[in-house]
Image (tube, rainbow, N blue to C red):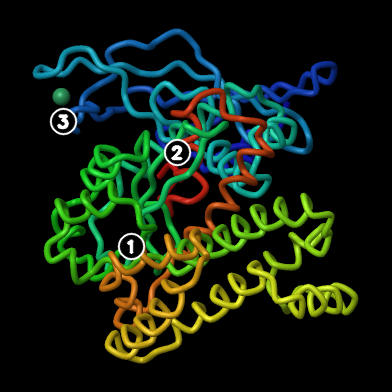
Amino acid sequence: MQGTDFYEQILGLTGPWFVADVQLDMEAQQVDVFVEHGEGETFCCPDCDRQLPCYDHTKSRQWRHLDTMQFATILHARTPRVKCPDHGVKQIRLPWAEKNSRFSLFFERFAIDVLLATQTVKGACSILGISWDESWHILQKAVARGKDRKQSKNLPRIGIDEKAFRKRHNYVTLIYDLDKSTVEAISDGHDTAAADACFDQLSDSEKQSVEAVAMDMSAAYVKSTKGNIALAEQKIVHDRFHIMKLATEAVDKVRRSEQKKLRAEGDDRLTGTRYLWLSGQENLSEKQQERFDAAWKAELLTGKAWAYKEMLRDLWVHDTPAEATTFFNDWYKRVIHTKLEPMKKVARTIKERLANVVSYCTHGITNAVAEGMNSKIMAIKRRVGGYRNRDNFKTAILFYCGGLDLYPQ
Ligand SMILES: [Zn+2]
């Protein structure tokens, strides 16, 4: 078949390589491209780059290339070997594929684009016409390549957070770059050792560049951060969203116990009001707003707890830690004299770590990035239908959220 020049251009081949033959198999919908090199050429030893004559060849091998005109395109070649005085007999590096890959570089680059665009391994398989294992292998290699190339950078604002894998009790800990929205480290578990293992994945200069760390109020993460980051006490910011979540949960606890009591007395004023207390006012429909107002006017404990929760939002509007502290102390005094035990517990928890809550005024960070990334990770997990095991899950997170340079050269 004609078209050898055409395929040389498509493959980007330059001397000493040329396309010796192209065969079209109509039945198999396949184009076979046979690549050879000129006589008397020299090649580099892969270990020392010394120019050496061809010693012999391997058996003919195949590489899947990008389809041409909807035909699966297969490259065929025998890889030359050189005999280096220092390194012995070695296969040379081929310009169209990475060592041991069954795909050409063009194909791998395209596969990475497809994996990123479809966000599912399965979806990529059907577009690329390759198996799940082959797609997964390309993804895995891309992550390994990206990790190898990763260079130390500045990480002024980071977040540390946990993420449940499958059911509860099966966690990974993640460190995020809050400025670039990337996952910088992952480890198994969510205790101090897990956080330490994450920090170990950062270089010393990266750790030194950290100015602020957002996190929930877990003692394990505080302890680990203090052990890994200098002057951590001034840098830790307990995340606003985690704290507001605690306060919202406290409102719900108050509602549940009050509801139980009222029901026993045949009072159903709180029945069906859960959503009203837990969602933001701005999310309520007109009808829901009416119901909320009625429940609110009933002067129940739940309404009181809700009001304290709403008041707490203002903790994050102050300009200085001193002003925020004054605000909190006032809020604390009011809450602590009530009978709202769950809310009092939240107040005490915040008080204990107050310096690292009001540090928000200095650093202005939250784990909102982490929360956003969380939903991205959840979506990836759902669409792929589980990653078989936790290691695969971690690899996929780095592929989609690691900000890595994934492509082969
Ligand atoms: Zn050599």
| Residue type marked 1 | Ile
Spatial separation of the CA atoms under disc 2 and disc 1: 25 Å
Judging from the image, what secondary structure is the residue with disc 2 in? helix
Q: In the rendered structure, which disc, 3 or 1, sits on the residue that comes first in sequence?
A: 3
Q: Residue at x 82, y 64 (%)?
A: 269
As helix, strand or loop, the secondary structure at mark 1 comes to strand
Could you classify mark 1 by the number of other residues whose Cα lies within 10 Å: few (under 14), some (14-19), or many (20 or more)?
many
- Of all residues, the one furthest to the front in this rendering is 265
Give the residue number, with chain letter if any, for mark 2: 142
Residue 125 occupies quadrant: top right
The residue under label 3 is 48
Q: Which mark is residue 158?
A: 1
User: Mark 2 or 3 closer to N-term?
Assistant: 3
The residue drawn where x is 16% and y is 52% is: 228
User: In the rendered image, which quarter contains the N terminus?
Assistant: top right
Q: Using the image as rendered, state which of residue 230 and residue 287 is in the foreground.
A: 287
Q: Is mark 3 within 8 Å of ligand 1?
A: yes
Report how far apart the C-alphas of labels 3 and 1 lie in the structure.
Answer: 41 Å
Question: Which label sits on residue 172?
Answer: none
Ligand 1 is in which quadrant of the figure?
top left
Q: Secondary structure at mark 3?
A: loop
Q: Residue furthest top?
A: 59
What amino acid is at disc 3? Cys
* Left or right side of 327 for 376: right
Q: Nearer the viewer, mark 2 or mark 1?
A: 1
For marks 2 and 3, give the CA distance: 25 Å
Task: Work out whether residue 159 or residue 243 is closer to the camera in this orientation and state it.
Answer: 243
Q: Nearer the viewer, mark 3 or mark 1?
A: 1
Residue depth check, mark 2 versus mark 3: number of the one nearer the observer: 2
